[in-house]
Image (spheres, rainbow, N blue to C red):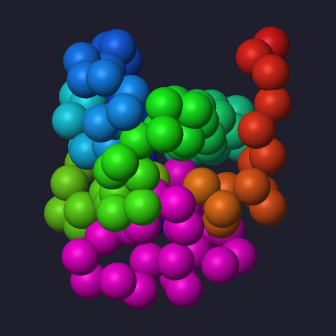
Amino acid sequence: MGKSVKIRALTAPDTPLSDFDPGEYLSGLEFYETDSTVTDEDRDGMAQLAHFLAFLALRGKSSKWAGSTVPRGTLAYRALESHFCSLTGWKELALDDHGLSYSQLASFLMGHYPPRMPK
């Protein structure tokens, strides 16, 4: 894969957790492209963020959890792709032309980078 895509800055969600959409939130973050290689530490960090966003949605009993997606064509999608496209199962996960189902993404990442407490 060419360039990796990384998050420039994290901001707190500005919506009540009962309406929190993790895919929409992730898609709204500011990203940048870099020629640097994505490391395993980068992958783990992105996976832990994805798990945390899923936790927020589930903990808040979000009405948007079930339909949450990360749309194709967004920098958020490209960031996930640059981090995880080499993992077994990514191609099957990324088959939907509209984007990634957030709940399926979180389940997929469980097998590769399980959630853990911060270091």
Would residue 22 be seen by someone viewing this image from the given angle?
no
Where is residue 13 drawn, in percent x and y? Answer: 31, 21
Q: Quadrant of residue 110?
A: bottom right
76 vs 16: above or below: below
Q: Position of residue 103 (x, y in %)?
A: 52, 60
Which residue is at a point 53% across and 52% down the rendered structure image? 83
Q: Percent x, y for residue 91?
A: 53, 82
Indicate left or right for 85 with 35 as reference: right
Is 91 inside the magenta-drawn segment? yes
The residues colored magenta run 81-105
Residue 109, quarter of picture: bottom right
Q: Quadrant of residue 112?
A: bottom right
Task: Identify the image quadrant of the C terminus.
Answer: top right
Image check: 46 left or right of 73? right
**Residue pictured at 39% horizontal, 27% vertical:** 17
Residue at the location (65% across, 65% down)?
108
Q: Is residue 13 visible?
A: yes
In this rendering, is residue 4 above or below 49?
A: below
* Front position in the image: 52 or 43: 52
